[in-house]
Image: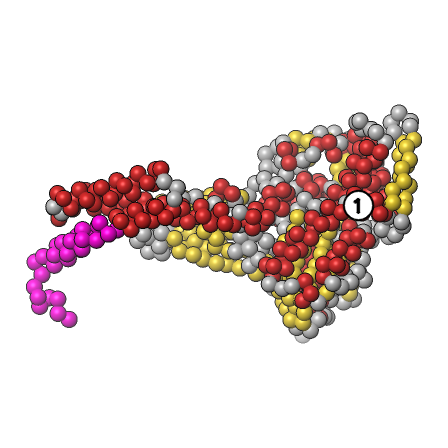
């Protein structure tokens, strides 16, 4: 008798076979790939044993060079050697300080691109080259094809930046099992899933972005309570501070692209040296052959960048406030990202939380290690120690719809646990309305004009009804990657429209960082504007309905004096809508019109009942 192996189509015939999956930290400065081997997560090295892959890509006439070789050539070929490309994701030319970059930048549709010797390259394409190198490293090391990868992103990446990351992975030939927030990945790597309970803060200062997440852990369940950050703050900003100081110290009016790149490289080396030494010497040779030297002390460097460290503390306080916990209630603070090696960063975090941060894992590797654990679970391997834990992440910014008056109706509030789906019912504004334009927005402000537009679509085929009779159910669904889809359905007719929100990559880093700050700083004025707009919408609806009723039944049911009284109240309110910005006055005039039409409404109701019962016998009304 022959034994047959039975498997689901497309699945391994050997259920016990370990599926090859990896976690990838696509970083601003360095990138890594990690996997699970013998139940332990480990970073995969290249053929020379190096764990970190510099996130640097050089384009030459014949090939694409990624990593250490590209990094070594950055000063000799600065225009074609792209570094820190993650900071260009979703940014336009007007958002970038071109004096800090040696590239030829183009303001192409969607986001800025770089003009290289092999043609124009977008940040998505450059990122894909980095991911392709990591994929090749993993497949060579593991001896097989990958079934998928978990790729980490900053917690404060918006919908467009997450989609750009997925697009880059697709270009690199990777199957994305999930996009995972970097601070959450770090928590997994620290083994916090095995903690009995507690509330932890993940302070993640990378090369280009800053994130803070507050997590609650309860016997294997991760729940992200709140997240905040600054998408325009990272280790690169500390490098630029040193480079700016060097220009002033050496009295350099201008620098060539090669000198600019070399100065930033020397600044980065000095920053790293000052993490372990009180002073360092910076030397550099200019294009004209001059050799320059400067001494930089740790004390002066800390003074030079003190405001950058302070800038990271505002999102930390905001996240604590959103999570509803005090700094002294945090059970542990995990430091993530190479930039957290700076002593004054660790000292500032320690002062805020009143405890020493956790730094026993390599801050450069911790995110990739956590992503590898999640990838192994999603691939179906369920390694020992990973069974039985549940990960609940959150969306960083609120999502909603535009309503009458240019107001935002939030459907999914910020810091809602994902994946999630929420629905809300809306209705028509005018009689006979057969279509509805649906505008999806993201942000914390009350006005559409102050939020970020994500998508627009239309629901057509609504049966003509009186205003307010139609019931349109709009459903927002966010998947585990934080990506959004929206559907609208008219409940009576069943007509439906749906859109996968794939916005253009047009949100600037500054917009992301400022969204919550603006929301807090302008909450009072926003609420005042919202109250005014809502009063105006209610008043306009009443004016339109009363005008229509007067045209239909006014002369038949009212005396000339009554008709003139109602008409005068309508005109007074209509005029106020054109000129008045005082919400109380509009409300008073609205109440006056309601009072003026009370008798008219009763007469119309009586007339309607008489018309409905005309010709009906009394016996026909009995049950």
Residue 550 placement: quadrant: top left
Where residue 599 appears, x then y in whole percent?
18, 53
- The answer to whether residue 62 is seen in the rendering is no
Q: In this view, does 92 lie to the left or right of 583?
A: right
For the image, the number of numbered tags is 1
Residue 392 image point, x, y percent: 61, 63
At a point 40% along the width and 46% down the height, the residue shown is 532
Foreground: 262 or 72? Answer: 262
- Residue at image position (9%, 57%) is 614
Percent coordinates x, y for residue 485 in the rendering:
51, 51
First to last magenta residue range: 594-623
Picture residue at 72% right of the left edge, 61% below the top:
353
Res 292 → quadrant? top right
Residue 287 position (above or below residue 501):
above
Q: Can residue 533 be seen in this view?
A: yes
Say if 500 sits above or below 393 in the image.
Answer: above
- Give the class, few, some or many, for how many residues have Cα within 10 Å of label 1's Cα (few <14, many ≥20): few
Which quarter of the image is occupied by the C terminus?
A: bottom left
Image quadrant in which the N terminus is located: bottom right
Scheme of image coloration: secondary structure
Residue 378 in the image, given as x and y percentages of width and height: 65, 62
Does the magenta portion include 599?
A: yes
* Residue 463 in magenta stretch: no
Q: Residue furthest top?
A: 288
Q: To which residue does mark 1 refer?
A: 303
Secondary structure beneath dot 1 equals helix
Residue at image coords 75%, 31%? 102
Q: Main secondary structure of the magenta part?
A: helix
Q: Which of 292 and 216 is in front in this view?
A: 292
């Amino acid at each position: 008798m022959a034994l047959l192996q039975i498997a689901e189509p497309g699945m391994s015939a050997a259920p016990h076979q370990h599926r090859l999956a990896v976690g990838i930290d696509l970083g601003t400065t360095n990138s890594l790939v990690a996997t699970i081997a013998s139940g332990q997560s480990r970073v995969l090295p290249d053929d020379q044993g190096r764990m970190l892959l510099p996130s640097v890509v050089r384009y030459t006439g014949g090939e694409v060079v990624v990593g250490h070789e590209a990094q070594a050539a950055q000063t000799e070929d600065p225009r074609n050697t792209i570094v820190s490309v993650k900071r260009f994701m979703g940014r336009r030319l007007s958002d970038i300080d071109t004096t800090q970059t040696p590239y030829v930048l183009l303001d192409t549709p969607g986001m800025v691109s770089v003009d290289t010797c092999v043609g124009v390259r977008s940040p998505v394409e450059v990122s894909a080259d980095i991911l392709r190198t990591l994929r090749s490293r993993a497949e060579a090391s593991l001896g097989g094809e990958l079934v998928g990868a978990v790729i980490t992103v900053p917690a404060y990446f918006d919908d467009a930046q997450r989609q750009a990351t997925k697009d880059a992975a697709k270009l690199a030939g990777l199957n994305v099992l999930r996009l995972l927030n970097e601070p959450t990945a770090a928590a997994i790597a620290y083994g916090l899933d095995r903690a009995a309970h507690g509330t932890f803060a993940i302070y993640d200062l990378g090369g280009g972005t800053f994130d803070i997440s507050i997590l609650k852990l309860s016997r294997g369940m991760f729940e992200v309570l709140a997240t905040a950050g600054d998408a325009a703050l990272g280790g690169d900003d500390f490098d630029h501070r040193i480079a700016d100081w060097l220009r002033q110290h050496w009295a350099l009016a201008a620098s060539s692209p090669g000198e600019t790149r070399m100065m930033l490289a020397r600044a980065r080396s000095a920053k790293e040296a000052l993490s372990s030494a009180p002073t360092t010497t910076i030397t550099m040779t200019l294009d004209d052959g001059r050799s320059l030297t400067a001494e930089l002390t740790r004390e002066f460097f800390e003074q030079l960048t003190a405001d950058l460290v302070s800038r990271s503390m505002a999102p930390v306080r905001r996240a604590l406030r959103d999570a509803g916990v005090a700094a002294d209630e945090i059970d542990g603070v995990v430091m993530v990202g190479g930039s957290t090696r700076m002593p004054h960063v660790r000292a500032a975090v320690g002062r805020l939380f009143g405890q020493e941060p956790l730094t026993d894992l390599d801050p450069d590797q911790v995110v990739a290690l956590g992503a590898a654990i999640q990838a192994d679970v999603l691939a179906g391997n369920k390694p020992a120690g990973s069974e039985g834990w549940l990960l609940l992440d959150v969306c960083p910014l609120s999502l909603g719809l535009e309503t009458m008056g240019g107001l935002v109706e939030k459907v999914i509030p910020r810091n809602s646990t994902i994946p999630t789906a929420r629905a809300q019912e809306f209705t028509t504004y005018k009689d006979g309305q057969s279509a509805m334009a649906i505008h999806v927005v993201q942000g914390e402000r009350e006005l559409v004009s102050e939020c970020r537009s994500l998508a627009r679509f239309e629901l057509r085929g609504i049966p003509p009804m009186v205003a307010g009779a139609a019931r349109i159910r709009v459903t927002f669904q966010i998947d585990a990657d934080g990506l959004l889809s929206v559907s609208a359905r008219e409940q009576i007719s069943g007509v439906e429209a749906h859109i996968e929100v794939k916005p253009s990559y047009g949100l600037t880093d500054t917009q992301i960082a400022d969204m919550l700050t603006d929301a807090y700083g302008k909450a009072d004025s926003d609420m005042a504007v919202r109250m005014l707009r809502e009063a105006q919408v209610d008043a306009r609806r009443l004016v339109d309905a009363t005008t229509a009723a007067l045209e239909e039944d006014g002369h038949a049911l009212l005396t000339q004096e009554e008709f003139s009284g109602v008409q005068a109240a309508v005109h007074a309110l209509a005029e106020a809508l054109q000129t008045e910005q005082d919400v109380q006055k509009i409300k008073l005039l609205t109440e006056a019109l309601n009072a003026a039409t009370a008798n008219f409404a009763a007469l119309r109701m009586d007339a309607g009942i008489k018309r409905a019962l005309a010709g009906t016998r009394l016996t026909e009304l009995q049950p």
